[in-house]
Image (tube, rainbow, N blue to C red):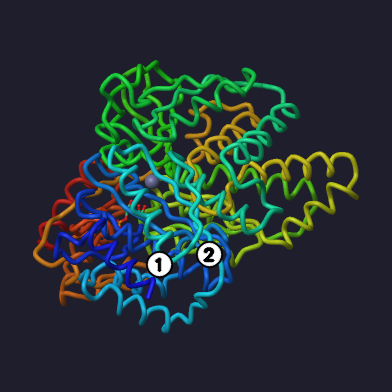
């Protein structure tokens, strides 16, 4: 059959050259780029099956290893609504990635039966990649996989991960926007510019924003956007990948958040706010250095709270009855959770690490705001929420209409499909501008508890099991008791451990009343794990 030719081709062009088992984890497959070519080819095959199972709707394939260093790469699939691949398919992806070249044909046949893919249907796949030098070769492997099963592949070249999610969504739902990079700018940046027309610069808001681009794709795209902002926001961009700057190396959102240090490559000015993106443009944190050169970090928790409080304020002004809720993970700073619950009186749900879990939980509110502490998150708005706001925009009194129209623009700035550094940056800037506040004012909302994150390498990270949204450790036996005992010695102490889904390590998190205590507690818990 013609499929026979396909599999022979796979063996020749994208052979499996390693026996190392690879798993579809929190963020798809991720490992050394040199081990990925056959995996990406096979994800091309799988994307075609997924598209057929979804009646020919478009599926996305993104080639990226996000905040990992340059030698790594990765691949993940995007479902028709721009969301992460449905969880039940992760196992199928893992199976297909690991079979030998000899078994590829029969396994693909079994999967076609299992998922009941109608091979006579058309299939459409969008492919994007980050700036890694290994990405073009992998993207080509994905195209080959798609073509092999007679799907149509459309390549987007270098785009941020969230741009590809956006394009997939638009392709399948044309009310959401136009499925192209230009369509993305038109909707998201266009809505921000609309907001700027409505909100003059007031108070302490400074239109200059420094950006750490992590030497990745996000900074490059902001460089395109910058020229269209008509001075409403003056972006000063650093770490755009030139001058020998290495992707994510000592810079970018993950480095800033985890090391709690400013990135290299940025010319710092005291109290100047800086937005730091990760390598594929889906995470965002803010920070500034004070006059003593101390860094003040405003992470995903802060962004979530800023957005939630503004949305709540606008809803109130609209008089719309729409429920708002926040979703966090165990990594959220305890002070943030307390502030949301006690002061903002907004309900908060805690879920397992991984954006798919947060996204899912957020959908249960009319307006759900979800962020991981590392700066990955967005806002999702239900049909009911959008309809209610639109009604006020049409029928409300003058003041209500104004707030509702602003909120509609705010919704358009949001990339609802997935956490998006560029979209989130414009959302944050909107709130700071609307309130006429500085980054220090923003920081004053509440005081973070000092915290520390550590990685521990163990023989088998999967020996650790957790429950209660990863806040309790159920195996190995006795570990949780030990953690409780250590935690009880520290005022405001909290700590938990969990196996990473993207690296072969166990992560330890601790917070306490002082940095010394948080550091010590983290080290003690790490010792207990080891
Ligand atoms: P793991 O390696 O499972 O902790 C990390 C992040 C997640 C998420 C994924 C995907 C932390 C503590 N963990 O997952 O939040 O962003 O990577 O990139 O930041
Ligand atoms: Zn990322």
Q: CA distance from mark 1 to mark 2?
A: 11 Å
Task: In this rendered view, identify the residue nearer to me: 427 or 346.
Answer: 427
Residue 434 image position (x, y, % from top left): 66, 31
Residue 508 seen by the camera: no
Badge 1 or badge 2: first in the primary sequence: 1
- Residue that mark 1 sits on: 46
Disc 2 is placed on an element classified as loop
Quarter holding the N terminus is bottom left
Residue 8 image position (x, y, % from top left): 27, 66
Residue 11 seen by the camera: yes
Task: In this rendered view, identify the residue nearer to me: 186 or 129.
Answer: 129
- Residue that mark 2 sits on: 123
Disc 1 is placed on an element classified as helix
Quarter holding the C terminus is bottom left
Task: In this rendered view, identify the residue nearer to me: 200 or 382.
Answer: 382
- Which residue is pictured at 37% across the width and 56% down the height? 144
User: On the picture, is 154 further left or further right than 93?
Assistant: right
User: On the picture, is 501 further left or further right than 89?
Assistant: left
- Which residue is pictured at 39% across the width and 22% down the height? 238
- Which residue is pictured at 51% across the width and 54% down the height? 370
């Amino acid at each position: 059959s013609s499929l026979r030719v396909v599999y022979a081709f796979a063996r020749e062009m994208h052979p499996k050259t390693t026996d190392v088992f690879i798993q579809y984890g929190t963020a798809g497959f991720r490992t050394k780029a040199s081990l990925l070519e056959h995996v990406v080819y096979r994800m091309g095959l799988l994307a075609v099956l997924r598209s057929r199972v979804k009646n020919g709707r478009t599926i996305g394939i993104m080639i990226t290893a996000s905040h990992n260093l340059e030698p790594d790469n990765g691949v993940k699939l995007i479902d028709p609504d721009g969301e992460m691949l449905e969880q039940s398919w992760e196992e199928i992806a893992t199976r297909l990635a690991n079979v030998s070249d000899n078994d590829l044909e029969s396994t693909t046949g079994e999967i076609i039966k299992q998922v009941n893919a109608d091979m006579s249907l058309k299939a459409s796949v969008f492919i994007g990649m980050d700036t890694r030098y290994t990405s073009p070769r992998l993207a080509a492997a994905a195209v080959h996989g798609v073509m092999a099963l007679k799907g149509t592949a459309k390549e987007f070249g270098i785009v941020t991960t969230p741009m590809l999610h956006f394009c997939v969504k638009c392709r399948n739902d044309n009310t959401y926007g136009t499925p192209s990079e230009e369509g993305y700018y038109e909707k998201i940046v266009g809505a921000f510019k609309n907001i700027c027309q409505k909100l003059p610069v007031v108070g302490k808001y400074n239109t200059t924003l420094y950006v750490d681009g992590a030497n990745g794709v996000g900074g490059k795209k902001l460089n395109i956007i910058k020229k269209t902002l008509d001075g409403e926001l003056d972006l000063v961009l650093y770490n755009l990948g030139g001058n020998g700057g290495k992707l994510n190396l000592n810079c970018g959102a993950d480095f800033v958040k985890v090391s709690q240090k400013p990135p290299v490559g940025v010319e710092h000015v005291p109290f100047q706010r800086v937005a730091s993106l990760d390598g594929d443009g889906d995470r965002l944190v803010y920070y500034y250095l004070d006059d003593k050169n101390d860094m003040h970090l405003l992470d995903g928790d802060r962004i979530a709270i800023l957005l939630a409080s503004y949305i709540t304020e606008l809803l109130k002004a609209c008089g719309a009855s729409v429920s708002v809720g926040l979703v966090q993970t165990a990594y959220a700073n305890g002070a943030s959770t307390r502030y949301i619950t006690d002061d903002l009186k907004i309900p908060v749900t805690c879920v397992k690490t991984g954006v798919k879990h947060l996204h899912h939980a957020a959908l249960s509110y009319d307006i759900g705001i979800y962020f991981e502490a590392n700066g990955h998150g967005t806002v999702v708005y239900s049909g009911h929420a959008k309809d209610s706001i639109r009604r006020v925009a049409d029928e409300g009194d003058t003041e209500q209409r104004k707030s509702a129209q602003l909120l509609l623009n705010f919704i358009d700035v949001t990339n609802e499909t997935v956490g998006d550094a560029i979209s989130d940056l414009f959302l944050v800037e909107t709130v700071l501008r609307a309130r006429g506040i500085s980054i220090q004012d923003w920081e004053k909302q509440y005081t973070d508890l000092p915290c520390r994150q550590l990685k521990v390498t163990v023989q088998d990270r999967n020996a650790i099991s957790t429950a209660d949204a990863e806040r309790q450790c159920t195996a190995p036996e006795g570990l949780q008791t030990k953690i409780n005992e250590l935690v009880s010695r520290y005022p405001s102490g909290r700590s938990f451990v969990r196996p990473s889904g993207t690296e072969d390590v166990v992560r330890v998190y601790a917070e306490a009343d002082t940095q010394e205590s948080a550091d010590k507690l983290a080290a003690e818990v790490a010792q207990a794990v080891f």
